[in-house]
Image (cartoon, coloured by chain):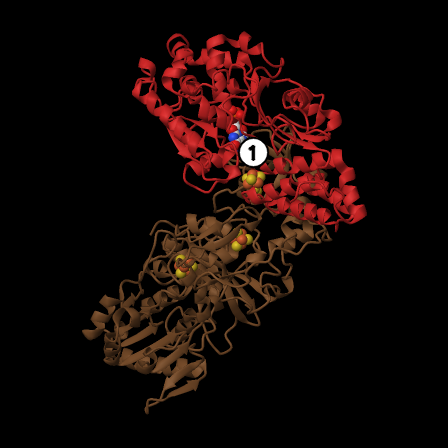
Chain colours: A brown, B red
Amino acid sequence: MPKITVDGASYEVAEGRTILQALDDQGVLMNGVDIPHYCWHPKLSIDGSCRLCQVEIEGIPKLQIACNTPVRDGMVIHTRNERVEKAREGVMELLLINHPLDCPICDKAGECKLQDYAFEYGVPHARTREPRRAGKKRVDLGPTIVFDQERCILCRRCVRFCREVPGTGELSVFSRGDQSVIETFPGEPLDNDYSMNVADICPVGALTTKDFRFKIRVWFLEDVPGICTGCAKGCNVHLGVANNRVYRYVPRRNDAVNGTWICDEGRLSYARIGADDRIAGHEVRQPDGRALPVSIDVALEEAAERLRGVIDRKGAGAVGILASPHATNEDLFVARRLLEALGSSQAGVAVRTGRSDALLIQPEKAANAEGCRRLGFGPAEALLERARGGAVAALLVLGHDALATQGPELLETLRGLDVVLLADSHRSELERVAQVVFATRVVAEKHGTLTNHAGRVQRVVPAVEPSFDAHAEGEIMWRLGRALGLPGFDGAWDLQAVSKALAETVPAFAGIDLASVPPDGVPRADR
Amino acid sequence: MQKAPFITSYLTEHTADDAFATLAGYRAHGGYEAARRALTQMSPEQVVELLKDAGLQGRGGAGFSTGMKWSFMPKDSDKPKYLVCNADESEPGSFKDRLLLERAPHQMLEGILIGAFATGADKTFVYVRGEYAHPANVLQRALDECYAAGIFGANCLGTDLRHDVVVTRGAGAYICGEETGLLESLEGKKGQPRKKPPFPAQFGAFGMPTTVNNVETFSHVPHVVAKGADWFRGFGTEKSPGTTIFGVSGHVKRPGLYELPLGTRLDEIVFEHAGGPPDGRKVKGVIPGGMSMPILPASQLDVPMANEFLRERKTMLGTGGVMVMHDATCMVRVGCIITYFFRDESCGQCTQCREGTGWLHKIMQRIERGAGSPADLDLLLDVASKMEGQTICAFADAAAWPVQGLLRHFREDFEEHVKQGKCPFPESFEL
Ligand SMILES: Cc1cc2nc3c(=O)[nH]c(=O)nc-3n(C[C@H](O)[C@H](O)[C@H](O)COP(=O)(O)O)c2cc1C
Ligand code: SF4
Ligand code: SF4
Ligand code: SF4
Ligand code: FES
């Protein structure tokens, strides 16, 4: 392995990498070793055009671009001396001579690399007296993205992204020299499943998403690490949070899952968190059919009462759980323990499926479908078949995915049961057939782990607090077990203890508890 | 177009003769005998060594040793290998390759055949400047003759060497003459130079090992093979052997082509051969090697035209395009023209080139208008220094150097503009 020295520090790096790649592999790029760069992106082909990443290499007379220069054993690199700084200053000045400097009205301000680098490496005053190059300010590139020609620094990241990632190639540089401009071909808008990533990788405010534009200044946002729940991929995201509200998802790099990308559908799914159709409190259905808002304790008492009735009449084995693939592993583990305590085997899960591709998008449209399987939840069809056959008299339904997979027939089946309890986050027809409804937290509102399609266990933490009383499914089931006086369900709800028990008792989760899952998750290939 | 230079040597000896462009006419002067000798009596290594001994340097502008370049072609590669003949000739002030294409196409083709043998190349692409329709047609006709005569194709000159030549027409941009810009254009893409590494010898046309040489470079090759390294070194200087074809343009009595040994003095070319400036005028400055090369003032024309001497005067031979300007010429207007050209032709990938070329042009125009300030002179130099030596290809250097040359030798022209608030050269050419 070649050994290189950068500003006096040595690194053992992989053969065949360029300087920037090698430093990125080490995790030190812009995190100890600052080599500013615009056109280079870890997940795109090397362009070598912005010329900002120039460094001095001993023995080579000219400065070299770090993004495209392969490492050699014994290479001695300087990133901070006067020559390098002068070259950077030159690039920064030239990038700024035609820049509109409209930061006050630019949505990228605060996370703009031109702003950042100009501050860090630029010259403080302008020496141009000529008018700046005028360009189009609000070009509608397609359904998701707006383009500002004047702000573009022509790094071509967006062009390479469209060619290399979705492979759709909508964007190109048209014309040449200082007339160069990013455009789409006539009648071919920027429209693909991943289009909004171009706004993330655009170093400046040239590409912005229609969804996030002008919603909030980014410096008000806190980036909370999380997982997209749009499908079984479990893409790592940052939830942009302010005022207890999620304003956006942006990709959080995880080379083992999503690299630096997320799909548009997943990105926009943040809107479900604070949506108007959230179930905003617990309810008990009155004999006249109306829903009565109640406290969690009243809802639990009512639910326990009804379950006891079924257990008395038909036995505990007639109580089943239709689980949710949106619940965490910890939630599902409690469901499993509840069934075990009851001595029931009536369990299943419904997973909505849809379009998939070879890049990220998985057919299963939930974040924890694999976790369900690993915790022993089989297909919902079998459970519902048994319910129709009379073997199930009470069903605790988590989430409403079964509505999508089973259709209205599900409602028929549920109406035929003695007791239906619902724990869900969003309104659906299911509420009408449930006697008790518990408001649950969504993934962005709780602690837990999720298992993605490939078996990687990933951690989530609360990014926002619901403005109403809502609880994790696990907690609801725990408290229900306690209300029923089931063995093992004593004491207060303790997620840490549940997590420990999961790690200790379920082989598929051996050694994985909340505290031990690193930010990029733990791979678990075996089922 | 001239049929032959005013002064000829081995390259252009027969170009006045229309028949020389035909296979029969070329053969009448021993055509393809050098190739036959190389293919039948020499090894590829011997050819490469011969070229190294002769010291032939590329005539496309950079002056790199041709023998060395050929030796970089991988020998053990199982991929097809390509030669490219760069006939894009678009450097302003350069018009020598056109003569060689139109009047001596077989001479160049013979050089290509020898190059193919020496490098093991399977195919040559001749990339002809888009506007050169006639030269391309002449070349195609010559090539058709070669195929009919079995010079190219499956058994070149009856040997088991297989080599094909394809004539392609350029896409009409200066940057398509830069070798990797050419390769992109050849592949049907936008003419934008490639970052290096990888270098063309590893990853060239269509990703295959490729060597690019200029029209004139190939044209010298048969002579070196036929007559030997010592003979070749009988022309030119010790470090720059051989002749080259100087294209003299601008304010001289006899503009045109002159084939002369490298190392011929610039003042000899301008005054003796090209007849000097029009009567009543004096020479003010001369660009020695095409527009990208820094200008020299009248006082510095006593320089031998070879890189080892020109470099001492901070300029280079380039393509040998000698551009002469007389004393009514406004050097700021010259600067405007040059910076406009580079602004217009920059491919726009590199920050310094895309933004710097435009800025230089704007500052030049401002000074020419009389709106410049004293600080603008150093600003020009500062912008030029920011463009130099930092980009994907040498275009940005080629845009920066002439500006530096103008300010080095004609700073007073610039200062007068600023002082008077207008152009002090009413008799200069119009912009
Ligand atoms: C901007 C630019 C334009 C060029 N244009 C030409 C050209 O028109 N013809 C040419 O032969 N070389 C041109 N060159 C030089 C080529 O890149 C290359 O060095 C040359 O073709 C190599 O051939 P040689 O070794 O035989 O000189 C150009 C270089 C640059 C930087
Ligand atoms: S729009 Fe953004 S990403 Fe695309 S080239 Fe311009 S600056 Fe780069
Ligand atoms: S691929 Fe799946 S997990 Fe990733 S962003 Fe899209 S929906 Fe979310
Ligand atoms: S130096 Fe200029 S012409 Fe050459 S690649 Fe860069 S932008 Fe293009
Ligand atoms: S990051 Fe290296 S040239 Fe742009």
From this view, report whether residue B284 is shown above or below residue A388.
Answer: above
Describe the element under mark 1 as helix, strand or loop. Answer: loop
Residue type at numbered disc 1 = Glu
Q: Quadrant of residue A267?
A: bottom left
Chain letter of disc 1 in the image: B
From this view, report whether residue A348 is shown above or below residue A180.
Answer: below
* Mark 1 residue crowding within 10 angstroms, few (<14) / some (14–19) / many (20+): some
Toward the front, the furthest residue is B279
Which residue shows up at 58% across the image and 9% down it? B234
Q: Where in the figure is residue A39, as x and y percent of width and height?
A: 54, 47
Q: Quadrant of the C terminus of chain B?
A: top right
Q: Quadrant of residue B347?
A: top right
Q: Where in the figure is residue A312, as x and y percent of width and height?
A: 27, 80
Q: Where in the figure is residue B297, as x and y percent of width and height?
A: 73, 29
Q: Quadrant of residue A439?
A: bottom left
Specify whether tag 1 is near ligand 1 (CB below 8 Å). Answer: yes
- Circle 1 is placed at which residue position? B91
